[in-house]
Image: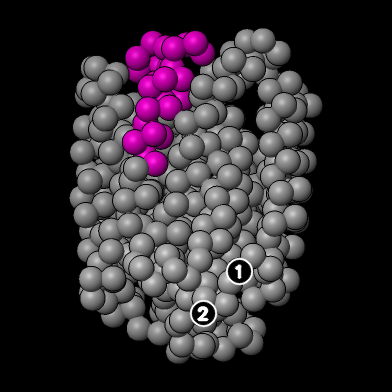
Amino acid sequence: MTAAAANAGRYRWVIVALLFAATAINYIDRQMIGVLKPTLVAEFGWTESDFANIVFWFQVAYAIGYVGFGRIVDVVGARLGYSVAIVIWTIGHMAHGFATGVASFAAARFGLGIGESGNFPAGIRAVTDWFPQRERAFAIGLFNAGANVGAIITPLLVPVLVLYFGWRSAFFITGIFGVVWLAAWWFIYRHPAEHKRVTPGELAWIQQDPADPVEQIGWSRLLSVRETWAYALGKFLIDPIWWFFLFWLPGYLFERYDMDLKTFGLPLAAIYLISDFGSIFGGWMSSRLIKAGRTPNFARKSTMLLCALAVTPIWFAQSIDSVWAAVLIIGLATAAHQAFSANLYTLPSDVFPRGAVGSVIGIGGTVGALGGMGMALFTGYILDSTGSYEILFAICASAYLLALAVVHLLSPRLAPANV
C-alpha cells in the first residue's frame, strides 16, 4: 500500500472483510453437497448421472439468478441486493436437511443457486463503489479468497457435524452462519459517500478515478459490444472447471485413493488452502504491475497467461499414485483458477461504467452457469460410461489458455466499452 493510500484511511478494507466472510459462507453452503456425496450416494443409491442432475439444477438456478441479481444490484445497490441474496440462499441451504431424494435435493439446490448467484454481482459492485481501479483486482482477490476458506472449512467441519449430529442437522447448523453475517452486513455497510467511518481523505482516494456515467444501461446495449462477450465467454470456459473441482473432487479422492469421511478432509482442505494463495497472488500481481506503470491490459493478461500455464499439469493428475503429490498438482490448478478468476472478474470494472458493472457481471455469470450445466451432465455421462477422469482433467488443462485467447481476441486493448 502506498503512503497516500495509508494516509487516506483504511475502512474500505473492513468492507472487503465482510465480502470475504460472505464468500466463505457461500462456499460452505455450496460445497456441502460435494463433501457429502459419498454419504448420500450410499444412502440413496445415486448414480453419477443422478448426482450430476442435482448439480445441474443448481446451475440452472445460478444462470437465472446471476443475470437477475446483476440488474437488481445495479438498481438497488450492494447493501439491499446482497441482503436479499443471502436470505434466499440460506433458506435454500437449510432446505437440504428436509430432502429425501433426487427431486427434493434438486429443488433445494435450485433455491440455493438462486440466492448464491447474488454473491459476486453484489460483491464486485461493492468493490467498484469502495475502491479505485488500481486496488480493485487486489480487493477482489482478497474477498474471492473467501471461496477457498469456505472450501477448506467444509471438509474439516462437515464430517465432524455428520458424525455427531447426522447429515441433516449439518445443513441446519451451518445455515446459522448466513443469519449472523446478514445482521453484521446490514449494520455496517453503507455507500462510502454516506458512511460515517470514511474520512474525507479516504473518500477522495476511493473516488480518484475519472467520473463515469451512473445512468442505467440496457442489456441490449451491453449485449451488442464485444467487451461483454470477452468477459462472458471467458466465464463460459473457466466456470465449469471450478464447478467440477468443487463438486467432484471429494468423490474423486474417495474413489482414487480409497478414503472415507474421516480421512479425505485434510487432503481436500490442503487443495483449497493452496488455492487461497493463488487468489490473493493473482489480484496482487496485476495490481502491482499497474502501480509499476504497466497498463491494465498488460497487467491483467500477463497474470492470466501465467495462471493458464500453471493449470496444464492437471492433465496428468489421474496417473499420480501418491495422494499428496496429487494434492500439489490439483492445488496448483485450483490456485491458478482463482488467480485467473480474480483478474477476469476485474475486467468489467476496467472497461464499463459503474452503472453497468453489475449487469455485465450478471451476464457473464449466467453464461458461465450455462457452461457449468453442460459440464455437469457431461461429467456424469463420462464417469458412468468410462469410470475415468482422464478426459475431464484434459478439459481442465486446456480451458484457461482458450479463455485467455478469447478475451484477447474480443478485447485486445481492454479499451473502454462503447455503451
Residue 341, above or below 350 = above
Q: Nearer the viewer, residue 354 or 98?
A: 354
Residue 306 image position (x, y, % from top left): 21, 54
> Is the residue marked by circle 2 packed among few (<14), some (14-19), or many (20+) residues within 10 Å?
some
* Spatial CA span between label 2 and label 1: 10 Å
Residue 25 image position (x, y, % from top left): 61, 40
Q: Residue at x 43, y 27 (%)?
A: 269
Marker disc for residue 198: 1
In this picture the colour scheme is: one colour
Residue 359, above or below 121 = below
Residue 1 image position (x, y, % from top left): 36, 62
> Is the residue marked by circle 1 packed among few (<14), some (14-19), or many (20+) residues within 10 Å?
some
In which quadrant of the rendered view does residue 192 lie?
Answer: bottom right
Marker disc for residue 161: none
The residue that label 2 is drawn on is 204
Cβ atoms at labels 2 and 1 below 8 Å apart: no
- The question of residue 40 being in magenta is answered with no
Residue 82 visible, this angle: yes
Q: Is residue 395 left or right of residue 172?
A: left
Residue 242, above or below 2 = above
Q: Residue at x 23, y 74 (%)?
A: 294
Question: Amino acid type of disc 2?
Answer: Ala
In which quadrant of the rendered view does residue 217 lie?
Answer: bottom right
Disc 2 element: helix
